[in-house]
Structure formats: structure tokens, C-alpha cells
Image (tube, rainbow, N blue to C red):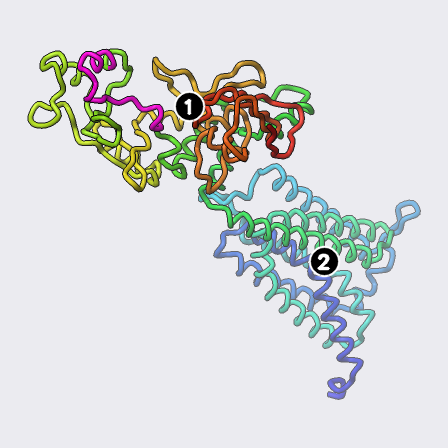
Amino acid sequence: MEWLFDPAIWAGLLTLVVLEIVLGIDNLIFIAILADKLPPHQRDRARLIGLSLAMLMRLGLLTIVSWLVTLTAPLFSVGPLSFSGRDLILLMGGLFLLFKATTELHERLEGVTHTQTDSKAYAAFGAVVAQIVVLDAVFSLDAVITAVGMVDELGVMMAAVVISIGVMILASKALTRFVNAHPTVVVLCLSFLLMIGLSLVAEGLGFHIPKGYLYAAIGFSILIEALNQFARRNSLKHEARVPLRERTAERVLRLMGSRKRSAAAAEAEDAQAPEEVAFAAEERNMVSGVLALGERSIRSVMTPRSEMSWVDLDDEPAAILRQLQDTPHGQLPVCRGELENMLGIARTKDLIADLALRQGILESGEGSPLRPAIVLPDTAGVLRAIETLQRAHGQLVLVTDEYGAVQGLLTPVDILEAIAGEFPDEDEQPAIQARAPGEWEASGSADLRQLEQALETDVLVGEGLEYTSLAGFLLARFEGFPEAGQQIELDGLRFEILAVDERRIVSVAIRRITQPVAEDAAS
């Protein structure tokens, strides 16, 4: 028992344990990869059985120390190269590692297997355990031979093997979980195995590669991967702050091929052949309209007050009849004197019938064509407006502000236009008209989201903005009410005021310029 109090014994034991653990890290990497091929409920058992059998094999190897020492004796020669038993084992083990790592890399890079589906084909339990044992033998043979030369006591060698295997058993599950959660780590580990397999082949052929070089390369690569994982975690944290709805919309549009104008222009310059587009621009715009619908307010899709048509009962019946005959609308608000003095909503054909039969419009009572108006506040969202329109049985909805003043009206066509683009009436012109390549003319009431799609930009609509039209966008960027001829440049686009009418911008000319410049207003 004197050896228990010998510091040299303990120093040798500690050295061997550290050596076995360090040399076993590459073994653990491959065990993590092999265990993933089994069903989840068998992975822990495979690791335990495989490493336990490997420990028994190592202990068996240590009991025949004298034979291991003789493995360095040459068995035969091929030209200038002589091969010993140790060289043959290292050579075959290295070739096996090169083959196994190459096939694993091919499967992962080509996407052949490793998909988490119910029909996943798992490897046989016995085959995986056998591979774990073989790999442990290949990885640990050099360490065992080194241990023979470092320590004389067989018990110390066996104790070091048992301790190191115990540590490997405890660490293998955590390492497997980490490797499975980080696919890039798997590729990095397989690259390590290629490097280690090459070093074993070199050792078997008589070319010694210092272990320090391998461990330095592995350590440096692990450091770079750790920085990459840290950056990825920070990126995910930053992405998590973006609302899920916005992230989903961005990914869907990216899959459909939606690109910013500047990025598309840069790619077009470098493209050697035209790229096949799976979805047309109109399809992408409609999908974009659907995804953005839930976050829009009624004010961004309604027909504004300035463009509303309504019947004033203070007018002469003949004038009202001419107005009804000329209007393309099927329903109209009916008021007296002013829009706020709302009497109701009526169908155009019913109003014409009343005027023809009674020479006037019956405001109330049985037989009156007027129906009570359905009202929504302008703070409501579009989804709530859709629910209201579904219950309105074809009737239009009036939009009012917090003081009860009418701000506009909403129909199912307005919702459709928010998704698929503008559908002008017979008496209307499109709000956005292309005049030439890179040139447009837009009305001040043009919807900003539709204008963004037409201009292929993303700088017009922002969060928390109270305006929804081009006029509101321009007024927010001029110090005062602009005059005709004034210009502003933003994101490579020049906006020029063409016409104004007292308190509103009537039309704007938009031209794409060569170089985007910072936002600036000039008179």
C-alpha cells in the first residue's frame, strides 16, 4: 500500500487521466454523431454500452502490456517503408476515419438524410455500438501505448482508464445534445475527424505529425465557432424583438422573390443570365397586401371625405336625379345641407325610383329608401372593418373621428383594392400612373403602400406615422405647405409637386434618379 502515498504515483495518475480525457474528446465527437442515428430512446443506452465495452477493451489491452510494446517491431517492409503492428492499426484506423467522415459530410451537405420526420430510417443498435467500440480502439491505442511508457504500475493505468471513461460517459450526452442543436458544429467536428484520420494515416506510414499542431488547429477552430455561435445567439435575440407577424411576412415575401429596388439593381448589374422568377410582381404585391392588412388602419384603405359622393336633399329633385344618373356608385349617403347632417344610406336605384314616383325622396317612415348608416371609428383596424362589412349585407360603412365628423366611407371594394391594387370607377383616373420608364405621376391621395410597390422602395411607410397618403408623406417633409414646382429627393427618387389646390396637394411627379441621396427638402 506504500504506492498510495507516493506523489509520483498520483502525479502519473493525474497525468494519465488528463491525457485520456484530452485524447478522448475527438472520440466523444464521433460518438455524438453515431448516437444520433439511433431512435431517441436508444441513444443513452448505446453510449453507455459502447463506452463500457470500450473500457473493458482498454483494460484488456493494458493487461498485455508486453505485447503492446512489441507492436513497434517491424513486421515487413515495402521499399523504404517498414510497417509494425502499431503502424498497420493506425493506418487502417485512419483510412476508416477518412471514409466515415467523408460519407457523413456528403450526407449532410447534400441533404440525403438526417431529417426529423416520422418515417426516419434509424441505424441498427448493434451496428452503432460496434462502431463506437471500434472507434474508441482506434482513438485510444496511441494513448494506451504512451501510457505504458509513462507509468510502470498496471493498477494506475487501469484506474486512469476507468476514470477517463466515466468522464466520457457523463459528457457524451451533453455533447450529443449540443451537437444536435447546432448543425454547423457537426460539420466542424467531421472536419476534425478528417484531419485526425489523415494524421493517423501519416503516422502509419512513418510520418510523425506532432499532436500539438492538431490540438492547436482544433482549439483555434473551436474558438472561431464559439464566436460564431455567440454572434448567432445575439442575432436571434435581436430578431426576437421584431414582431412575429413582421418576421413571418418578411420571410414569405423573401421566398416569393420580393427584393428591394437597390438590391435588385445591384444584382442585375452582376447577373450573366436572366433569373427565372417563380411569382409575378402582381402576385407578390397581392401577398404583401394580405400580410400587411392586419396592421393597417381604416384611414389607410377608406375612400377619403374629399372623394366621397353624397346626395344633398336641399338640392332640386331634377339636380339630384341628374347626379344619380351620372354616378357609377350603387349606394350613396343621403344628407341635408352638409355631410355631418346624415339621414341615412340608400341605394341609387331606390332613390331614382322615389324621385320618379314621388318627385322627391321620403326621409322616414314606411317606404323610405333610407337605411341607418353603419359607423366605425377611424382608429379601428382593417380586420374589424372586414367583420363589420360581412355583417352589413352589402351596405357601405361610414368612418368617423373621435368628434363624430365623417372622415370617409368603406366598402368591400376598398378592402380588395388594399390587397390587389386600385380599381378606378368610371369617373376616376388611377392614382398612380406610369408615364415613362422610371417616371410616374401620382395624385396626392395615392396610398403609400401601393406607391411603395410601384416604386419598388421601402422608405415611404413607417411605424407610428399618422398619414397614409402621398400628400401626408410630402407635407411631413416640407416646412410649410409646398407650391407647385417644389422638389424633394429621397432614396434615389425625386418628388416634384405638379399641382396644388388651396389646402391639398393634387398631383406629384416622381422620377427615379441615378444615385440615392439623403433625405432633403429644397424649394
From where the camera sits, is residue 281 visible? Answer: yes
Please rate how many residues cluster around mark 1, counting C-alpha atoms within 10 Å: few if below 14, some from 14 to 19, many from 20. many
Residue 356, percent from left and from top: 13, 11
Residue 342, image x, y percentages:
21, 30
List the residue tagged with mark 2: 139
Task: Locate residue 147 relative to residue 178 in the image: left or right.
Answer: right
Query: Which of these two is toward me, 158 or 238?
Result: 238
Residue marked by disc 1: 421
Residue 38, given in percent of the width and then of the height, sits at 53, 51
Secondary structure of the residue carrying tag 1 is: loop
Give percent across and percent down for residue 243.
47, 46
Q: Is residue 206 magenta?
A: no
Q: Is residue 142 above or below residue 493?
A: below
Residue at left 43%, top 25%? 502
Query: For residue 59, what is the image quadrant?
Result: bottom right
Q: Residue at x 68, y 53 (%)?
A: 227
Residue appearing at x 76%, y 88% in the figure: 2
The residue type indicated by label 2 comes to: Phe
The CA span between labels 1 and 2 is 66 Å
Q: Give the structural element (helix, strand or loop) at label 2.
A: helix
Give the total number of marks visible in the rendering.
2
Q: Which residues are magenta?
A: 304-323
Q: Is residue 321 one of those drawn in magenta? A: yes
**Label 2: how many residues lie within 10 Å, few (<14), some (14-19) or many (20+)?**
many
Q: Nearer the viewer, residue 200 or 400?
A: 400
